[in-house]
Image: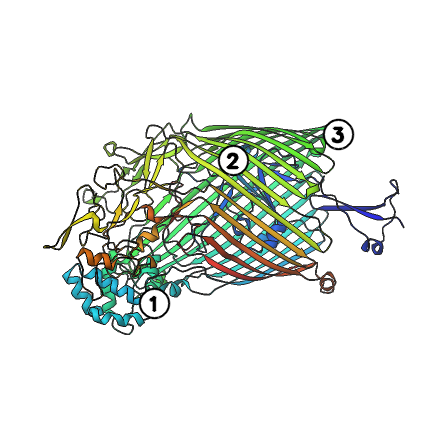
Amino acid sequence: MNKLFLVISFFMCFLTAFAASDDSLGVEPSVDDSLIADEEIVCDMTNIPEVLVIGYGATSNVFAGAYSTVKSESLKENGAVSLSQALVGKMAGVQISAADGALDAEPKMVIRGGGSITQDNSPLYIVDGFPVNSISDIPPSEIKSISVLKDASAMAIYGARGANGVVVVTTDSKAYDKVNVLYSSRYGVRRLAKKLKTLSSGDYVKMQYELAQYSASNAERFTQKYGLWDDLDIYDDVPAADWQERVFGETAFFTSQSVVLKIGGKKADYRVGYTFDSNDGIMLGSGAKRHRLAFSLKSDLHKNISFELNSNYTNRENMGAGTAAAGSSSTSRLKHSVIFSPVDLNPYGNGDEDDEEEAYSSLYDPLTVTKDDYKRVEKNEMLINAALTFKKGVFSVEDYKNLDLKVRSEAGVWRNDTKTFRAYGSSTSQARQYGALPLASINDRERSKFRMANVLTADFNFSVYNFSVLFGQELVDERDGFTYNEARYFPQYISPEQALSSMSLGKAQPVSTYESPADRLLSFFARANLTKSRDDMEASLAFRADRSNKFALGNQWGYFPSASFAKRVSLDDRNSLKFRLSYGLAGNNRIADGLYRVEFEAGQATDPSVFFDEVQQTFLHAGSVLYNPDLKWETSVLRNVGVDADLALLNLVVGLDFYMNTTMDLLMMSEIPVVSGYKTIMQNVGETSNRGVELNLRYSPRLNYDWDVQFSANVAMNRNRVEKLGDIKESLVSSGWAGSEISSDFLLKEGEPIGCMYGFVTDGFYELDDFDYDAEKKTYGLKDGVPSNAELLASSSYFGPGFLKFKDLNGDGEITEEGDRTVIGKAKPKCIGGFNFFLKYRDWDLSASFNWSYGNDVYNANKIEFTSSNKYLYRNMTSEMEKGRRWTNLDSDGNVVTDPAKLAEINAGASIWSPFIGRYVFHSWAVEDGSFLRFGNLTVGYNLPYELIKRLKMSSCRVYMSVENLWCWTKYSGYDPDVDTRAATPLTPGVDYSAYPHSRTYMASLNIAF
């Protein structure tokens, strides 16, 4: 019998097959299942076109732009809890991170570094052809593919909204049988991934003893509380309270249940999905719940008219105030859990001792302050998108065989209602501003968006060429507003729930309301594509004009053209190269409304009262931002050159891209002299650039039927630079974590990247040789030529050997903020990437995902706060200040030593300065290498055999176990190097302050299809 081949071809999701013998010469014999089962099946995938959805249309795999794609198989094999986690490390040049590990931390996606220095750099999200605000609510199991479009060839057609890249998501909505049911179930736990090491009870008490010796009243108070020096050894045997474990050590259980019903027919496909998530947080009192209902419909109303409907409703509830990562040192809640006293002297007493300790440390019992700071957020979100498509039959052009005409009309409505309920108990810093009496507030924010678009597409087929044109119009209208209610001075022991349900029990404050002007964007766009048959060439031109009401007349229109070209070169029957080139413009208008015109604000309660005829008058006053009628679009020039190699003989696919993006007329808030009556003004100043290279690799060796192995890797290097800043040349920016103690800690300067950390250079500590010792007075005086920073660090209690020292950079003999600060760190990584491995043997599979970052610095603000006394007593510290490492002035008998010889003997092994400092100062010791390699996900799965699932009336059944955040290799001393807590502006990246710690996740899952 001649050898039998089964030839299988795929296009999109459709499968066709036929069989032929090797000598049949085109005669197709019948195929018997029993024969095929024993024969070898050979699939040639090299000539299958990959359909990539881009701006308002689709193109084949000769698409001339730069993009990265992740298929559903990769997402399902990964087993990640959320879609954003599943994408980490899988696409070159796409950096995905969250501010911290909180349940409600919204993932941030930045493509190729981001061009704007003060505005939002997030991309545009498109789901099944419709724009959405976020993709974080979409379950990974529902995704068919995700493509990230990175250059002008696809971004420019979206205009202002696509200036930072476009993320195109296609869900799996097609039903291949009449009815498909998909069920997914997940159960798991989260645990704190890492804890910071703090001082032991004995070390803490002896350090507090030393600090108390510089004040007679403090020394007496310490003795009354802890005893004499000779008694302090007993604390060596007292277990230290592990506040991190008590606050963040919850075993957080979570579950996710998802059901999808798909009904397919000849004229319509329906899809209904419901998802329920319940998550406990690792922080005491935190958690989240989510209900999501989705419905989609694709129907042929007529042979030439089709209708699409995509809709979903999401209800979320988040509990817990977190760690106040965006606040300052006065509101941080993480510090209470790390540096609160580890010694509980009065666990059953009346609390007087604790009150004293809290008063002098400005810290409060972590359990109490966590419970007293109540936050509940309720979000209700509705999205409805609909489209009508009219094919050429409607327009009576059936006789034009070479013409395919289509008109698509889209409309969408989005609405989000977010209510935030806050209550502050008597232990919180907020309540202590009002006599330590509770206060409560309710903030109701409503946002809405309306979108309408009309698109005409015409395809002309001429011999080996295909020419298509697209014309479109789009209108987007967005609105935002809120109502804020607050009441103060509630009864001291009222619960948060009682206060929020009975606001009248407190003293009502004036109600604040706000409704923003409508943010409207009117757009017209066009695109022309020319492709050659067999997809070996494509040329494309696109143009978009956007009109935004955020600018004054004369500057409202922005114009964004683009051009691209791609050429495929076949090396042989199975290997090919594709060369790509693109150039274009994109715009940015992501600023507040009304900055181009004079606006007034309502008077505040603190404003002076004005009376007329004994009636208090309401008045308006100018805001703090000076209007600028010359504001115009921020514009980015995008350039890309790429080459793709499809080396089927080596089972290897390689993609290489070089890009250079320049952003001009930066929209930037600038300070102006106060004599103007204003503080700031929004201006178009400066220019930034991002230059980089991206490399993608995918290796899939062909093994036998039982084995499947896949390996993929990507690396991206981006160099960000501030090219121009107009007349100012440089500007200092504050991250704000230390309030007014650190006025500025970032530098924006021409020739430097965004995210330059600006501070003093640490020079160890003052040595004995830096001083002259007066034996009679037992005092130290700095030698001539040795600069002092005692005034800078506000040290009134102690200045001498062992004190923190900074370098005198300008050599003037003084340590000053004006002359001795410099760039001490850079937040931008030199390169980022990831690699992924998948192995399948028969019904078993294993996948592993890694991501990494190299060359970025992290500003560890926690390290500054956790290793200095500031102006407080009774604060614990992290292990950097443990006995034997820190400088001390105490001998073994508890006496304060001043003799140089004895001090030298006592501190022979000291490697760090004394922690007794009067204020926070940013210096290079707090800048750490943030490079890391993270083992992000490990999944082991098993697919039930076909014979078994057939008996169970299933089409597939997979069980799998996953671990997320398995390990992180890094030199960083904080909780996690992938942190960005001051992300309100792109100017202060890479700061780690009061971040909610990351967790490690263990999960068991079940996926069933009927």
Task: State which quarter of the image contains the C terminus.
Answer: bottom right
**Which of the pair 197/33 is nearer the observer?**
197
Label 3 element class: loop
Residue at the image point whose x is 60% and y is 51% from the top: 837
- Colour style of the rendered protein structure: rainbow
- Say left or right for 267 vs 72: right
- Say left or right for 83 vs 392: left
Residue located beneath label 1 in the image = 241
**Residue that lies at the very extreme toward the right in this rendered image:** 1
First along the sequence among labels 2 and 1: 1
Residue located beneath label 3 in the image = 401
Q: Position of residue 823 (x, y in %)?
A: 34, 39
Residue located beneath label 2 in the image = 475
Q: CA distance from mark 1 to mark 3?
A: 81 Å
Q: For residue 961, what is the image quadrant?
A: bottom right
Residue at the image point whose x is 65% and y is 61% from the top: 942
* Residue type, mark 2 in image: Leu
Compared with 838, 385 (above or below) is above
**Which of the pair 587/816 is nearer the observer?**
816
- Say left or right for 278 vs 609: right
Q: Position of residue 663 (x, y in %)?
A: 45, 31
